[in-house]
Image: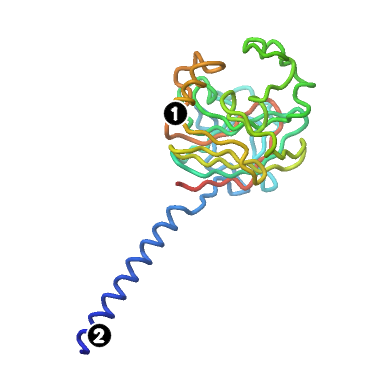
């Protein structure tokens, strides 16, 4: 009887150990990875470069782009930046950001180097001053090529939360704080479904590489961009579109 009891206890302990190990492994795989330490630009560099482009700096817990610091002329490489330590396929990405009046930027993912810039190949979660951008910048000539009815205005596919030139955010679910105030964005990417979140609300979702996705990719802005969106793994990055930028709490977890 004692031997049977001892055997039962041994099996029970072994089973618990397996469950604990499995739980710890699962937890470890899903842990958030900080992409910014709040003090340095460690891990970050320019696209097609081994160094950070002029203007990008770490200050006061923020990864910033300051147009007044963009004075260096001997830099060679792209002005958009990437987190170059690791590539990601399926992930959940989170960042807090703010832009100035008339500001413009974006979050790129599945970036591959060797092209003219991330926009040629990488999907983009758009960040822009929806309210003031068109009043400060002339969009007419650019938008006329896409057959816009009101080309002078910021188009819905160009607004914050859009999968740029592909999918449009739901205006009823979109809550965007004005330029100069902090917003939060989240991207959840899997091969089955992609979600874009803005300030705690999901504003759009789509199925990557689906028939609908290819239909959109093969028309409009990307009709001549043969490699747009084809990569299923790559770097995360931010766009320099000529305005000051502020990012913080930049993190990612693998799915």
**30 w.r.t. 156: above or below:** below
* Residue 234: quadrant of the picture: top left
Q: Residue at x 24, y 84 (%)?
A: 6
Q: Which residue is mark 2?
A: 5
Apparent side of residue 46 relative to residue 172 in the rendered image (left or right): left
**89 w.r.t. 121: above or below:** below
Q: Secondary structure at mark 1?
A: loop
Between 143 and 54, the residue placed more toward the observer is 143
Q: Position of residue 57 (x, y in %)?
A: 64, 38
Q: Secondary structure at mark 2?
A: helix
Give the crowd class for mark 1: few <14, some 14-19, many >=20 residues within 10 Å: few
Q: Depth-wise, is mark 1 or mark 2 nearer the camera?
A: 1
Q: Position of residue 226 (x, y in %)?
A: 45, 17
Q: Residue 210 bears which disc, if any?
A: 1
* Residue 145: quadrant of the picture: top right
Query: For the view shown, which residue lies furthest in the bottom direction?
Result: 2
Q: Residue at x 48, y 43 (%)?
A: 91
Q: What scheme was used to colour the molecule? A: rainbow
Q: Position of residue 236 (x, y in %)?
A: 52, 36
Between 118 and 54, the residue placed more toward the observer is 118
Say whether disc 1 or disc 2 marks the residue closer to the N-terminus. Answer: 2
């Amino acid at each position: 009887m004692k031997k049977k009891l001892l055997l039962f206890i041994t099996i029970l302990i072994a089973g618990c150990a397996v469950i604990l190990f499995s739980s710890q492994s699962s937890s470890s795989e899903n842990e958030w990875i900080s992409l910014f330490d709040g003090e340095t630009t460690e891990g970050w560099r320019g696209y097609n470069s081994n160094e950070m482009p002029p203007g990008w700096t770490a200050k006061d817990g923020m990864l910033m782009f300051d147009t007044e610091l963009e004075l260096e002329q001997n830099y060679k490489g792209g002005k958009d930046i990437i987190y170059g330590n690791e590539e990601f396929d399926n992930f959940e990405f989170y960042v807090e950001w703010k832009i100035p009046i008339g500001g413009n930027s974006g979050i790129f993912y599945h970036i591959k180097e060797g092209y003219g810039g991330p926009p040629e190949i990488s999907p983009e979660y758009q960040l822009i001053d929806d309210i003031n951008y068109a009043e400060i910048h002339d969009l007419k000539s650019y938008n006329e090529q896409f057959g816009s009815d009101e080309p002078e205005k910021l188009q819905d596919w160009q607004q914050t939360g859009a999968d740029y030139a592909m999918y449009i955010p739901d205006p009823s679910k979109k809550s965007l704080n004005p330029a100069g105030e902090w917003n939060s964005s989240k991207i959840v990417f899997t091969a089955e479904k992609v979600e874009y979140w803005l300030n705690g609300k999901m504003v759009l979702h789509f199925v990557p590489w689906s028939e609908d996705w290819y239909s959109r990719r093969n028309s409009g802005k990307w009709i001549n961009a043969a490699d747009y969106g084809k990569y299923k793994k790559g770097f995360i990055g931010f766009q320099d579109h000529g305005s000051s930028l502020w990012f913080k709490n930049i993190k990612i977890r693998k799915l």
